[in-house]
Amino acid sequence: MNIITSRANQEVREALHNKGMKQWELADMLGISEFTLTRWLRKELTEDKKELLLKAINEA
């Protein structure tokens, strides 16, 4: 049985990990709920939304 280990939005997830941030902290910075952010991260983001998240992470 093959297990697929890739997840959507890996770049955003790695940026959060490298910064030592939790998803709820990013959601709070963006003024959205943690649930909304979790839903966004389930599928690949648009480039605009990905840039928004990465910018917020980098500025934290």
Image: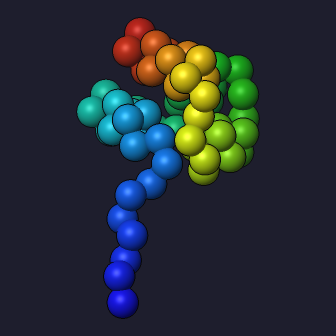
Q: Is residue 32 above or below residue 36?
A: above
The quadrant of the image that shows the N terminus is bottom left
Quadrant of the rendered structure where residue 13 is?
top left
- Specify how the rendered protein is coloured: rainbow
Q: Residue at x 43, y 34 (%)?
A: 12
Q: Is residue 55 above or below residue 15?
A: above
Task: Locate residue 41 relative to residue 16 in the image: left or right.
Answer: right
Residue 46 pos. (x, y %): 60, 28
Task: Locate residue 58 relative to residue 29 in the image: left or right.
Answer: left
Does residue 30 appear in this view?
yes
Q: Residue at x 59, y 18 (%)?
A: 48
Q: Is residue 51 above or below residue 45?
A: above
Task: Locate residue 2 relative to residue 28 in the image: left or right.
Answer: left
Q: Nearer the viewer, residue 8 or 13?
A: 8
Quadrant of the rendered structure where residue 26 is?
top right
Residue 34 pos. (x, y %): 66, 40
Q: Nearer the viewer, residue 9 or 16?
A: 9
